[in-house]
Image: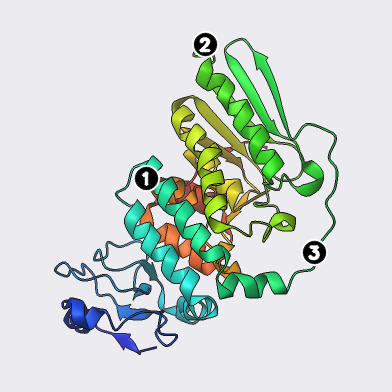
Protein backbone atom coordinates (compact mmCIF):
# COMPACT_ATOMS: atom_id res chain seq x y z
CA UNK A 1 0.00 0.00 0.00
CA UNK A 2 1.26 3.47 -0.87
CA UNK A 3 1.80 6.11 1.76
CA UNK A 4 -0.51 9.06 2.29
CA UNK A 5 -1.09 11.01 -0.93
CA UNK A 6 -1.82 14.67 -1.36
CA UNK A 7 -4.98 15.56 -3.23
CA UNK A 8 -2.87 16.73 -6.16
CA UNK A 9 -1.07 13.36 -6.27
CA UNK A 10 -4.38 11.50 -6.16
CA UNK A 11 -5.70 13.64 -9.01
CA UNK A 12 -2.63 12.91 -11.11
CA UNK A 13 -2.92 9.16 -10.56
CA UNK A 14 -6.66 8.82 -11.15
CA UNK A 15 -7.09 11.19 -14.08
CA UNK A 16 -6.10 8.45 -16.53
CA UNK A 17 -8.13 5.22 -16.81
CA UNK A 18 -4.94 3.39 -17.81
CA UNK A 19 -3.09 4.48 -14.66
CA UNK A 20 -6.15 3.96 -12.45
CA UNK A 21 -6.32 0.31 -13.54
CA UNK A 22 -3.17 -0.31 -11.56
CA UNK A 23 -4.89 0.48 -8.28
CA UNK A 24 -6.86 -2.66 -7.46
CA UNK A 25 -7.20 -5.31 -4.77
CA UNK A 26 -7.49 -7.95 -7.50
CA UNK A 27 -3.70 -8.26 -7.78
CA UNK A 28 -3.34 -9.17 -4.11
CA UNK A 29 -1.02 -6.21 -3.58
CA UNK A 30 -3.10 -3.04 -3.54
CA UNK A 31 -5.46 -2.56 -0.60
CA UNK A 32 -6.47 1.10 -0.32
CA UNK A 33 -5.38 4.65 -1.07
CA UNK A 34 -4.93 7.13 1.77
CA UNK A 35 -5.37 10.80 0.93
CA UNK A 36 -4.77 13.85 3.11
CA UNK A 37 -7.79 16.13 2.72
CA UNK A 38 -7.45 19.88 3.22
CA UNK A 39 -10.49 21.98 4.06
CA UNK A 40 -12.83 22.61 1.12
CA UNK A 41 -11.10 19.89 -0.89
CA UNK A 42 -12.20 19.51 -4.51
CA UNK A 43 -11.06 17.60 -7.59
CA UNK A 44 -12.16 17.27 -11.19
CA UNK A 45 -14.02 14.03 -12.05
CA UNK A 46 -11.63 11.13 -11.51
CA UNK A 47 -11.59 7.43 -12.34
CA UNK A 48 -12.71 5.48 -9.28
CA UNK A 49 -10.22 2.67 -8.65
CA UNK A 50 -11.01 -0.91 -7.67
CA UNK A 51 -10.08 -0.34 -4.04
CA UNK A 52 -11.21 1.95 -1.21
CA UNK A 53 -10.08 5.58 -1.32
CA UNK A 54 -9.85 6.84 2.26
CA UNK A 55 -9.62 10.53 3.03
CA UNK A 56 -7.84 11.72 6.17
CA UNK A 57 -9.39 14.86 7.57
CA UNK A 58 -12.61 16.15 9.09
CA UNK A 59 -15.22 13.36 8.79
CA UNK A 60 -18.04 15.93 8.88
CA UNK A 61 -16.66 18.06 6.03
CA UNK A 62 -17.50 17.74 2.35
CA UNK A 63 -15.11 15.64 0.28
CA UNK A 64 -14.49 15.01 -3.42
CA UNK A 65 -16.69 12.35 -5.00
CA UNK A 66 -13.75 9.96 -5.47
CA UNK A 67 -13.33 9.66 -1.67
CA UNK A 68 -15.17 6.62 -0.26
CA UNK A 69 -14.93 7.53 3.41
CA UNK A 70 -13.28 10.15 5.57
CA UNK A 71 -11.57 9.36 8.87
CA UNK A 72 -9.69 11.31 11.50
CA UNK A 73 -5.91 10.93 11.56
CA UNK A 74 -6.06 8.94 14.81
CA UNK A 75 -8.19 6.28 13.09
CA UNK A 76 -5.89 5.59 10.14
CA UNK A 77 -4.30 2.50 11.69
CA UNK A 78 -7.64 0.87 12.47
CA UNK A 79 -8.98 1.64 8.99
CA UNK A 80 -5.97 0.19 7.22
CA UNK A 81 -6.09 -2.91 9.42
CA UNK A 82 -9.78 -3.47 8.62
CA UNK A 83 -9.25 -3.14 4.88
CA UNK A 84 -6.11 -5.28 4.95
CA UNK A 85 -7.96 -8.10 6.73
CA UNK A 86 -10.57 -8.44 3.96
CA UNK A 87 -9.54 -6.27 1.00
CA UNK A 88 -11.91 -7.87 -1.53
CA UNK A 89 -14.98 -7.47 0.68
CA UNK A 90 -13.93 -3.89 1.48
CA UNK A 91 -13.54 -3.12 -2.21
CA UNK A 92 -16.89 -4.63 -3.16
CA UNK A 93 -18.49 -2.66 -0.33
CA UNK A 94 -17.26 0.74 -1.52
CA UNK A 95 -17.95 -0.10 -5.17
CA UNK A 96 -21.52 -1.05 -4.30
CA UNK A 97 -22.03 2.15 -2.33
CA UNK A 98 -20.72 4.17 -5.28
CA UNK A 99 -23.41 2.52 -7.41
CA UNK A 100 -26.22 2.69 -4.87
CA UNK A 101 -25.69 6.36 -4.07
CA UNK A 102 -27.75 7.24 -7.15
CA UNK A 103 -29.64 3.98 -7.75
CA UNK A 104 -33.30 3.38 -6.94
CA UNK A 105 -34.10 1.15 -3.96
CA UNK A 106 -35.08 -1.68 -6.28
CA UNK A 107 -31.89 -1.39 -8.34
CA UNK A 108 -29.85 -1.04 -5.15
CA UNK A 109 -31.28 -4.23 -3.69
CA UNK A 110 -30.58 -6.06 -6.94
CA UNK A 111 -26.97 -4.88 -7.06
CA UNK A 112 -26.46 -5.68 -3.37
CA UNK A 113 -27.76 -9.21 -3.79
CA UNK A 114 -25.46 -9.91 -6.74
CA UNK A 115 -22.48 -8.48 -4.87
CA UNK A 116 -23.33 -10.50 -1.76
CA UNK A 117 -23.57 -13.70 -3.80
CA UNK A 118 -20.20 -13.01 -5.41
CA UNK A 119 -18.60 -12.95 -1.96
CA UNK A 120 -20.41 -15.98 -0.53
CA UNK A 121 -17.89 -18.32 -2.14
CA UNK A 122 -14.90 -16.02 -1.86
CA UNK A 123 -11.75 -16.92 0.03
CA UNK A 124 -12.31 -14.28 2.72
CA UNK A 125 -15.74 -15.56 3.73
CA UNK A 126 -14.59 -19.18 3.45
CA UNK A 127 -11.76 -18.36 5.86
CA UNK A 128 -14.23 -16.84 8.33
CA UNK A 129 -16.52 -19.87 8.01
CA UNK A 130 -13.64 -22.26 8.65
CA UNK A 131 -13.14 -20.68 12.05
CA UNK A 132 -16.71 -21.39 13.14
CA UNK A 133 -18.08 -24.59 14.59
CA UNK A 134 -21.36 -25.77 13.08
CA UNK A 135 -24.30 -26.02 15.47
CA UNK A 136 -27.28 -28.36 15.18
CA UNK A 137 -30.56 -26.86 14.02
CA UNK A 138 -33.02 -25.95 16.76
CA UNK A 139 -36.79 -26.26 16.57
CA UNK A 140 -38.81 -23.14 17.31
CA UNK A 141 -42.48 -24.02 17.76
CA UNK A 142 -43.58 -20.46 18.52
CA UNK A 143 -44.27 -18.01 15.65
CA UNK A 144 -41.18 -16.20 14.40
CA UNK A 145 -43.19 -12.98 14.00
CA UNK A 146 -46.26 -11.90 15.95
CA UNK A 147 -48.94 -9.65 14.47
CA UNK A 148 -51.86 -7.89 16.13
CA UNK A 149 -54.25 -5.34 14.69
CA UNK A 150 -55.98 -2.56 16.58
CA UNK A 151 -58.08 -0.31 14.39
CA UNK A 152 -55.88 1.12 11.66
CA UNK A 153 -52.65 0.00 13.36
CA UNK A 154 -50.82 -3.28 12.77
CA UNK A 155 -48.20 -4.35 15.33
CA UNK A 156 -45.44 -6.54 13.87
CA UNK A 157 -43.05 -8.03 16.43
CA UNK A 158 -39.96 -10.17 15.83
CA UNK A 159 -40.31 -13.14 18.17
CA UNK A 160 -37.06 -15.05 18.55
CA UNK A 161 -35.94 -13.48 21.87
CA UNK A 162 -33.80 -16.48 22.87
CA UNK A 163 -31.72 -15.87 19.71
CA UNK A 164 -31.86 -12.08 20.01
CA UNK A 165 -34.16 -12.12 16.96
CA UNK A 166 -31.41 -13.37 14.67
CA UNK A 167 -32.50 -12.87 11.07
CA UNK A 168 -32.93 -16.46 9.91
CA UNK A 169 -34.71 -17.72 6.80
CA UNK A 170 -37.77 -18.58 8.86
CA UNK A 171 -37.89 -15.13 10.46
CA UNK A 172 -37.46 -13.51 7.05
CA UNK A 173 -40.33 -15.53 5.61
CA UNK A 174 -42.58 -14.72 8.56
CA UNK A 175 -41.72 -11.03 8.38
CA UNK A 176 -42.46 -10.94 4.64
CA UNK A 177 -45.81 -12.64 5.26
CA UNK A 178 -46.65 -10.06 7.92
CA UNK A 179 -45.69 -7.13 5.68
CA UNK A 180 -47.82 -8.42 2.82
CA UNK A 181 -50.92 -7.73 4.95
CA UNK A 182 -50.69 -3.91 5.00
CA UNK A 183 -49.58 -3.90 1.37
CA UNK A 184 -52.85 -5.61 0.49
CA UNK A 185 -54.95 -3.59 2.94
CA UNK A 186 -54.82 0.21 2.62
CA UNK A 187 -57.03 0.59 5.70
CA UNK A 188 -53.94 -0.25 7.77
CA UNK A 189 -52.49 3.22 8.21
CA UNK A 190 -49.65 2.49 10.65
CA UNK A 191 -47.27 -0.46 11.03
CA UNK A 192 -45.43 -0.56 14.37
CA UNK A 193 -42.30 -2.73 14.04
CA UNK A 194 -40.65 -4.05 17.22
CA UNK A 195 -38.59 -6.94 18.55
CA UNK A 196 -39.23 -9.06 21.64
CA UNK A 197 -36.47 -9.66 24.19
CA UNK A 198 -33.18 -7.95 24.95
CA UNK A 199 -32.48 -6.81 21.39
CA UNK A 200 -34.41 -5.70 18.36
CA UNK A 201 -32.21 -7.96 16.23
CA UNK A 202 -28.62 -9.14 16.49
CA UNK A 203 -28.45 -9.57 12.71
CA UNK A 204 -28.17 -12.58 10.46
CA UNK A 205 -28.45 -16.00 12.04
CA UNK A 206 -24.81 -17.11 12.09
CA UNK A 207 -25.88 -20.74 12.38
CA UNK A 208 -27.23 -20.48 8.82
CA UNK A 209 -24.20 -18.71 7.34
CA UNK A 210 -22.54 -20.80 4.67
CA UNK A 211 -25.61 -22.94 3.97
CA UNK A 212 -26.15 -21.41 0.53
CA UNK A 213 -23.84 -23.41 -1.72
CA UNK A 214 -25.30 -22.11 -4.99
CA UNK A 215 -24.74 -18.36 -5.23
CA UNK A 216 -27.12 -17.95 -8.18
CA UNK A 217 -30.02 -19.62 -6.35
CA UNK A 218 -29.23 -17.59 -3.24
CA UNK A 219 -29.49 -14.38 -5.28
CA UNK A 220 -32.82 -15.37 -6.82
CA UNK A 221 -34.13 -16.34 -3.39
CA UNK A 222 -33.16 -12.98 -1.88
CA UNK A 223 -34.87 -11.13 -4.70
CA UNK A 224 -37.99 -13.31 -4.45
CA UNK A 225 -38.53 -12.70 -0.72
CA UNK A 226 -37.14 -9.35 0.31
CA UNK A 227 -38.36 -7.80 3.55
CA UNK A 228 -36.34 -4.72 2.65
CA UNK A 229 -38.28 -4.20 -0.56
CA UNK A 230 -41.60 -4.59 1.27
CA UNK A 231 -40.55 -2.16 4.00
CA UNK A 232 -39.46 0.35 1.37
CA UNK A 233 -42.88 0.15 -0.28
CA UNK A 234 -44.57 0.59 3.11
CA UNK A 235 -42.12 3.21 4.39
CA UNK A 236 -44.57 6.10 4.97
CA UNK A 237 -46.67 3.84 7.20
CA UNK A 238 -43.87 2.11 9.15
CA UNK A 239 -42.54 3.20 12.54
CA UNK A 240 -39.64 1.03 13.74
CA UNK A 241 -38.98 0.94 17.50
CA UNK A 242 -35.44 -0.22 18.26
CA UNK A 243 -33.65 -1.28 21.43
CA UNK A 244 -30.52 -3.14 22.48
CA UNK A 245 -28.39 -4.62 19.71
CA UNK A 246 -29.23 -3.60 16.14
CA UNK A 247 -26.57 -5.46 14.20
CA UNK A 248 -26.49 -6.11 10.46
CA UNK A 249 -30.05 -6.82 9.35
CA UNK A 250 -31.13 -5.39 12.71
CA UNK A 251 -30.50 -1.89 11.34
CA UNK A 252 -30.52 -2.56 7.59
CA UNK A 253 -34.24 -3.41 7.62
CA UNK A 254 -35.63 -0.75 9.99
CA UNK A 255 -33.62 1.91 8.14
CA UNK A 256 -36.20 1.54 5.35
CA UNK A 257 -38.96 2.72 7.69
CA UNK A 258 -40.40 6.19 7.38
CA UNK A 259 -39.77 6.77 11.08
CA UNK A 260 -37.18 5.09 13.29
CA UNK A 261 -36.91 5.63 17.03
CA UNK A 262 -34.59 3.91 19.48
CA UNK A 263 -34.07 3.59 23.20
CA UNK A 264 -31.03 5.35 24.64
CA UNK A 265 -29.08 2.10 25.15
CA UNK A 266 -29.44 1.00 21.53
CA UNK A 267 -26.31 0.44 19.45
CA UNK A 268 -25.79 -0.18 15.75
CA UNK A 269 -23.13 -2.19 13.95
CA UNK A 270 -22.36 -3.57 10.48
CA UNK A 271 -19.92 -6.48 10.96
CA UNK A 272 -20.23 -8.16 7.57
CA UNK A 273 -17.02 -6.88 5.93
CA UNK A 274 -15.07 -8.35 8.86
CA UNK A 275 -16.57 -11.71 7.84
CA UNK A 276 -15.56 -11.32 4.20
CA UNK A 277 -19.08 -10.26 3.17
CA UNK A 278 -21.13 -7.08 2.79
CA UNK A 279 -24.51 -6.19 4.29
CA UNK A 280 -27.06 -8.43 2.58
CA UNK A 281 -30.46 -7.47 3.99
CA UNK A 282 -30.73 -4.20 2.09
CA UNK A 283 -28.46 -1.94 4.12
CA UNK A 284 -26.59 -0.51 1.15
CA UNK A 285 -29.95 0.71 -0.18
CA UNK A 286 -31.49 1.82 3.12
CA UNK A 287 -28.75 3.12 5.42
CA UNK A 288 -27.12 5.08 2.61
CA UNK A 289 -30.34 7.08 2.20
CA UNK A 290 -30.24 8.06 5.85
CA UNK A 291 -26.57 8.80 6.50
CA UNK A 292 -24.93 8.98 3.07
CA UNK A 293 -22.33 6.90 1.28
CA UNK A 294 -19.25 7.81 3.32
CA UNK A 295 -20.75 7.29 6.75
CA UNK A 296 -22.24 3.99 5.58
CA UNK A 297 -18.79 2.96 4.36
CA UNK A 298 -17.25 3.97 7.69
CA UNK A 299 -19.83 1.94 9.61
CA UNK A 300 -19.19 -1.13 7.45
CA UNK A 301 -15.40 -0.97 7.21
CA UNK A 302 -14.74 0.03 10.81
CA UNK A 303 -17.04 -2.62 12.37
CA UNK A 304 -17.48 -0.17 15.24
CA UNK A 305 -20.57 0.27 17.35
CA UNK A 306 -22.56 3.45 16.83
CA UNK A 307 -24.47 4.73 19.85
CA UNK A 308 -27.97 6.15 19.76
CA UNK A 309 -26.91 9.77 20.22
CA UNK A 310 -24.55 9.64 17.26
CA UNK A 311 -27.14 7.75 15.21
CA UNK A 312 -29.62 10.53 15.92
CA UNK A 313 -27.08 13.21 14.97
CA UNK A 314 -26.32 11.42 11.70
CA UNK A 315 -29.98 10.77 10.84
CA UNK A 316 -29.81 6.99 11.10
CA UNK A 317 -32.68 7.27 13.59
CA UNK A 318 -35.27 10.01 13.96
CA UNK A 319 -35.76 10.07 17.74
CA UNK A 320 -34.59 8.60 21.03
CA UNK A 321 -37.48 7.12 22.97
CA UNK A 322 -37.85 7.85 26.69
CA UNK A 323 -37.13 4.91 29.01
How would you rate the neighbour count of disc 2 (Cα within 10 Å): few for under 14, some for 14-19, many for 20 or more? few
Q: Residue at x 63, y 28 (%)?
A: 177
Which mark, residue 162? none
Give the quadrant of the N terminus. Answer: bottom left
Query: 162 or 225: nearer the eye?
Result: 225
Q: Secondary structure at mark 1?
A: helix
Q: Answer left or right for 152 relative to 142.
A: left
Foreground residue among 204 and 210: 210
- Marker disc for residue 107: 1
x and y, in percent, of residue 203 in the image: 65, 51
Question: In the drawing, does residue 264 fall left or right of residue 146?
Answer: left
Residue 75 vs 178, above or below: the answer is: below
Question: Of circles 2 and 3, which is in front?
Answer: 3
Q: Nearer the viewer, residue 126 or 128?
A: 126
Which residue sits furthest left?
44
State the image coordinates of residue 238 (x, y, percent, origin top left): 52, 28
Numbered badge on residue 134: 3
- Real-space Cα distance between discs 3 and 1? 34 Å
Query: Does the CB distance between marks 2 and 3 fall below 8 Å?
Result: no
Residue at the spot 60% in from the left edge and 68% down from the top edge: 275
Q: Of callouts 2 and 1, which one flags the residue occurring earlier in the amino acid sequence?
A: 1
Of the residues under marks 2 and 3, which one precedes in the sequence?
3
Pointer 2: what residue?
187
Q: Give the alpha-carbon distance from disc 2 to disc 3, as whole Å.
A: 45 Å
Q: Quadrant of residue 297?
A: bottom left
| Closer to viewer: mark 2 or mark 1 | 1
Residue 293: tell me if it is visible.
yes
Colour mapping: rainbow
Amino acid sequence: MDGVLTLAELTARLSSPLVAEGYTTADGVGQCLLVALPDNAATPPLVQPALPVIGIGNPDADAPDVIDLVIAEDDVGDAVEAVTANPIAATVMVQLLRHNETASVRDGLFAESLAYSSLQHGAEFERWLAGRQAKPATDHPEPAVLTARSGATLDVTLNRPHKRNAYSASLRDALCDALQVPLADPTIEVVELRGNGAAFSAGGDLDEFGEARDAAIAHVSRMSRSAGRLLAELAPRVHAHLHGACIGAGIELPAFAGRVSAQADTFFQLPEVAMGLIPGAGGTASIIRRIGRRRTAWLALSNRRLDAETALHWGLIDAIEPD
